[in-house]
Image (tube, rainbow, N blue to C red):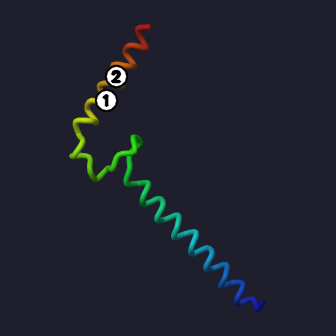
Amino acid sequence: MPIGDILYIIAIILFSFMTFTIIRNNFLSKFDEQERRKDLIDEYEDDYVSDKTENKEDKELKKKD
């Protein structure tokens, strides 16, 4: 195999890996730590509030025990 073909194959592999990584990171950046879509936050804003208050209540109960 000529060196040009080997370089071409390496370039294709690197391009595929970089493309996959960029798409994966772009997809992961659309979600928060609770696996909810960041761009749809207005639709379930009440859930965020209730989740935060539940977490605070749970932490307060643990501190009392």
Q: Is residue 9 shown left or right of residue 20?
A: right
Seen at 26% across and 46% down, the residue is 41
Q: Which residue is mark 2?
A: 56
Give the quadrant of residue 2: bottom right
Give the quadrant of residue 8: bottom right
* Coordinates of residue 19 in the picture (x, y in percent): 51, 70
Seen at 46% across and 65% down, the residue is 23
Q: What amino acid is labelled 2 in the image?
A: Lys
Q: Is residue 53 shown left or right of residue 2?
A: left
- As drawn, the label of residue 65 is none
Q: Residues within 10 Å of mark 2 (few under 14, many from 20)?
A: few
Seen at 70% across and 88% down, the residue is 5
Q: Which residue is mark 1?
A: 52
As drawn, the residue found furthest toward the right would be: 1
Q: What amino acid is labelled 1 in the image?
A: Lys
* Coordinates of residue 39 in the picture (x, y in percent): 28, 53
Q: Residues within 10 Å of mark 1 (few under 14, many from 20)?
A: few
Q: Is residue 51 above or below residue 65?
A: below
As drawn, the residue found furthest toward the top would be: 65
Mark 1: secondary structure: helix
Mark 2: secondary structure: helix
Q: Is residue 6 above or below residue 15?
A: below
Q: CA distance from mark 1 to mark 2?
A: 6 Å
* Coordinates of residue 54 in the picture (x, y in percent): 32, 24
Q: Is residue 18 above or below residue 7?
A: above
* Coordinates of residue 43 in the picture (x, y in percent): 22, 46
* Image quadrant containing the C terminus: top left
- Disc 1 and disc 2 in contact, CB within 8 angstroms: yes
Q: Is residue 9 shown left or right of residue 62?
A: right
